[in-house]
Every structure is written in structure tokens, then in C-alpha cells.
Image: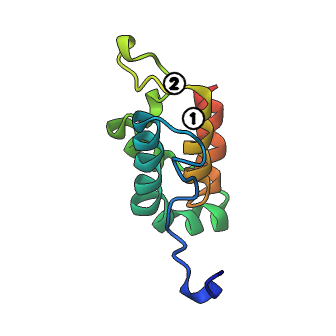
Amino acid sequence: MNRPLEAQDHDAPIFAPGAFRLRDEQAELIERARRFGRRVLAPRAEKHDREASFPIENFRDMHPEGLLAICIPRQEGGLGADFQTYCLAAAELGRYCGATALSWNMHVC
């Protein structure tokens, strides 16, 4: 049975690890992106949308989280994410700040 819209948790993860057959390390990276988006990106998103400004402070805050190195191999100091993990993490970031997720995509690519 579906819960009424007002009773749903809109900050719940959007990708169930079991449904996507995610390994533990994949699920953790996606969850890290979700928590970061909720905590850091969401409070700033409206400003960037309203001002059409580049979210440079979001990128500065992504660095210590390791998110700027998400697809860099672990042996090179990155998080070693595969394409699926990167895509799902990008979707989680995008739900909190589209400007950051889109520009982050260009950085990762």
C-alpha cells in the first residue's frame, strides 16, 4: 500500500541497494553522496538557482569528502567508483542541487 505523499520520507535513499544489486562499497559511496547533498548542497541550492551562479563552494566542500575523486582508482588515491556507482551518486546529488550535479558530471567526465 502506498503511503500518502505527506507521510513519505523525501530524504530517504532513492536507490535500494538490493534492487540495484549494489555491493556494500557501492551503497556506501551513494549514501555518502546523499548525506552530503542533504547536509551541504540543499541549503545552498535555491541561491544558485535564483542567481544562476556557479556552486564553487560546493566543489570546495566536495574535496574533503572525496567526491571529486569518485572515479579515480583507489591505487591512485581516489574512491574507485565504477560507472553505475557514479551515476547513482550523481542522481542523489542532483536531488539536492541540480547545478552542482550537472557541473560535477563535467568534472568527473
Q: Judging from the image, what secondary structure is the residue with disc 1 in?
A: helix
In this image, 102 relative to 72: left or right? right
Residue at 55% from the left image edge and 35% from the top image edge:
85
Q: Which mark is residue 71?
A: 2
Q: Which callout, 1 or 2, points at the residue further toward the start of the chain?
A: 2
Residue 39 drawn at (x, y percent): 39, 61
Q: Quadrant of the N terminus?
A: bottom right
Identify the image quadrant of residue 74: top left
Q: Residue at x 40, y 47 (%)?
A: 32
Q: Which of the colour schemes (rainbow, by chain, secondary structure, one colour) is used?
A: rainbow
Residue 30: where, in percent of width, then height?
48, 45
Q: Residue furthest toward the left?
A: 64
* Front residue (pair 36, 32): 32
Give the amino acid type for the residue marked by disc 2 in the picture: Cys
Q: In the rendered image, is residue 53 in sight?
A: no
- Residue underneath mark 1: 86
Can I make out residue 92 in this image?
A: yes
- Label 2, secondary structure: give it: loop
Task: Determine crowd level at label 1: few under 14, some 14-19, many 20+ residues with C-alpha closer than 10 A.
Answer: many
Q: Vertically, is 101 above or below 98?
A: above
Identify the residue at horizontal 58%, vertical 39% (top origin). Answer: 104
Q: Where does the image place residue 5, in percent across and percent down from the top left? A: 64, 85
Q: Is residue 4 left or right of residue 13?
A: right
Residue 51 occupies quadrant: bottom right
**Farthest front residue in view:** 1
Residue 28 figure quarter: top left
Q: Verify CB contact (< 8 Å) between mark 1 and mark 2.
A: yes
Is residue 11 positioned above or below 25 on the image?
below
Give the distance between the C-alpha atoms of the residues marked 1 and 2, in whole angstroms. Answer: 7 Å
